[in-house]
Image (cartoon, coloured by chain):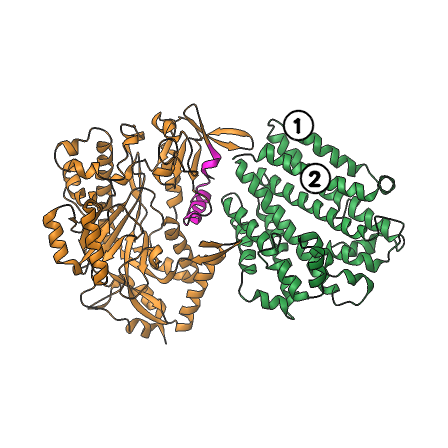
Amino acid sequence: MLSRIADSLYWLHRYMERADGMLRLMHTSYILSFDKVQASSMSWEPSLRIFTTLPKEEIDRIKKDNAAVLHYLFLETKNQNSLKVIITKARENARGVQDQITKEVWEQVNLLYHQINKPGLKEKLAGPEAIRTIDSFIKSSDQFCGITDSTMPRGQGWNYMNLGKYTERCLMTTEFTHFYFKKLDFDLKDEQDIIFWRSLLLSLSGYELHLKNYSNLKHNYNVLQQLAFDKNFPRAIYYSLDRANRYLTEIAGSNPVEGSIKLLRTYGRLYSSVKFADIELVEREGLEKYLIYVRKELNEFSQDLGRIYFSYS
Amino acid sequence: MTGESLFNQYPISSHIWDEMKGTEGIRHQYHSIYEACQKLNLDEFLQKHQLAAELFMSQGITFTVYSENEGIERIFPFDIIPRIITGAEWDHIEKGIKQRLSALNLFLKDIYNEQQIVKDGIIPADLIASCPHFTREVFGIQVPFDIYVHIAGIDLIRGEDGTFYILEDNLRTPSGVSYMLENREVTKRIFPNLLGDSNVRMINNYPLLLHDNLVSFAPRQIANPTVVLLTPGIYNSAYFEHTFLARQMGVQLVEGRDLLVNDHKVYMKTTAGLRQVDVIYRRIDDEFLDPLVFRPDSALGVPGLISAYRKGNVAIINALGNGVADDKAVYAYVPAMIKYYLNEEIILPNIPTYHMNNVEERNFVFENMHKMVVKETNQSGGYGMVMGNSASEEALKKAKENILANPRNFIAQPIIQLSTVPCLIDGKLQPRHVDLRPYALCGPNGISIVPGGLTRVALREGSLVVNSSQGGGSKDTWIVD
């Protein structure tokens, strides 16, 4: 596989995963923005803080204005991380590798691109149709996952795609977790009720699982357990790293080039630090430090991966 | 309005050949579509039109206009009524193109080696020497099977009496074949039964023929030579076609930055290291291919590529330097080439062409400017063209000045009223002018042409310019038996 192609496939899926995560968070935030309970005071804050680089004053200024926020997150091209920019980048990557992805996958990315460029979207987001519009994007994103899964051949390309997807997913879950726990200064003993955690869990599609699997006590510990270590929760940090590990092992196994052993070793260290950790250890070491460590290692891994497998220019 | 009245109200003009309707009514090759359309009403036609546009859009058969962080997608206009040519007419076209390409290949071999045709005085030396696409850098390079033009797109037009003429030869990187193939796929969806019932010759094996052809030029005698398609990248307007062909052939689509040359061999950079490349189907112009030989500022090409080509370690398709053979001034000598190399009379005639560096011809053209089209010899895509019948006096004066400043750069031809076909425009069938570009493949086992080609339509009323860059559209082209 051409290095350039591998690079594009990796980034295609990173962008698509990011779009997916953003959409889910926006969906939750939008609905919660109508609730007059304590947790909703954050409403758009997580979306704006995690996905944009707006200064605090600007966030405080617009965070109560649904239409303005949705416009900025969805369509503002000055926002380098708006959905429109991300989908455009995903499509650029897909376009450059059109012969390496299936026609169905390409058409789905293309459909999303036309969906976000459709005239009248701005007005829809500002009016009563906003939630339906967000839903339709989530549906398209789900379809992308399904189509990719059911049509893409399992091979090199598949491995790079999924490595990108799970890297991005792990980073997002880490980011989200970091944001919410920061509200309690990373103090697991500062007990919060489920309403506080609900928006986080909903944004990660993990609320139902939480209700089913976890007791009604010690929410802070339970939420952290689920988001970091639950091996059955597809957006857990451990789950994402575990998947990424599988695809990375295949890549390094079939393409043993200079540096691939070292890359495996670096990744293995990060993976073990999640696989063999537990809540007690994390609490003892400090949750903030732990989350920052995961994020930093993962970003460095992504750079190393690029240097070893994608360097073509 | 019903389909029947749509067809019956279709106007024809006495001095223009219409493909569908003659003085005796609908031509027999159009009967099947006429009958099928009779039952439809206008809304159904418009629905089909809409469906076709959506199909092109959703598949990304578009070109993009970029502005900050976002792009605007446009499709090439497609008209749903197919253009139909009879099997007998096609067989004549096929013979003519084969003859022409055989001569042009011999000409290219000759001109980059012995230059007998110049020495024998058939073609003036200054015409060749002054051709901007005559490429001295490839003089003497031996190409596999002496084939220079592997893929050709020959533009044909039809005059008022129905005769096919050769309008121009495209021997460098002719594009549009993906539209020929996609137009057919779209027609299959909007007129599902009609194609089968009408006995239309098949074209969808083109990518397979192309692939076989490319593989046959591999210099290494190995079972699975590596064939790549070299594209300038996603910002190129023909990028869709590049991905389409790569996908249909199952070959790698590469950019210049994916390749490198080491020890006169070409490699591509893969995640598993370097892999040698045998055949490059390039969709990049000559002057961008190798910054060491041609334009040093080109970032699209591969440094050292020509050295590998000269050594015969890689086949480049089409060969470099072909521009000398599709130069618009050299075009006029193709009948003489056919006589000289093949000792045959030309089957598909040329359009009379006046050279502007010949004083007598130039004066004749200047006197009859309103009946002439003036073209720049090294331009394509409909750029640099002045239509004498529609240009303003000022534009004509400017054209004359340009010609006098650099006569070798221009030719003139009498304006031929291209044939018309019915197009669905504003809820009516209206005649619009068309040309035809069949695609020919030259390989070691001869020349093959898929039956059909790209019919390009000038969508503006009365316009004779069919190029997509000048507001042209396209149609599916049927060869029926």
Q: How far apart are marks 1 and 2 (CA)?
A: 17 Å
Residue pictured at 60% horizontal, 32% vertical: A308
Tell me the quarter of the picture where residue B480 sits: bottom left
- The x, y position of residue A220, in whole percent, is 85, 51
- The x, y position of residue A129, in whole percent, is 63, 69
- The x, y position of residue A207, in whole percent, is 78, 56
Chain in green on the image: A
- The x, y position of residue B126, in whole percent, is 17, 37
Residue pictured at 32% horizontal, 75% vertical: B5
Q: In this view, does B145 lie to the left or right of A103?
A: left
Q: In this view, does B211 lie to the left or right of A288?
A: left
Tell me the quarter of the picture where residue B197 sits: bottom left
Image: magenta residue range: B234-259
Q: What residue type is labelled 2?
A: Leu
Q: Is residue B90 visible?
A: yes
| Residue closest to the far left | B360
What chain is tagged by disc 1? A
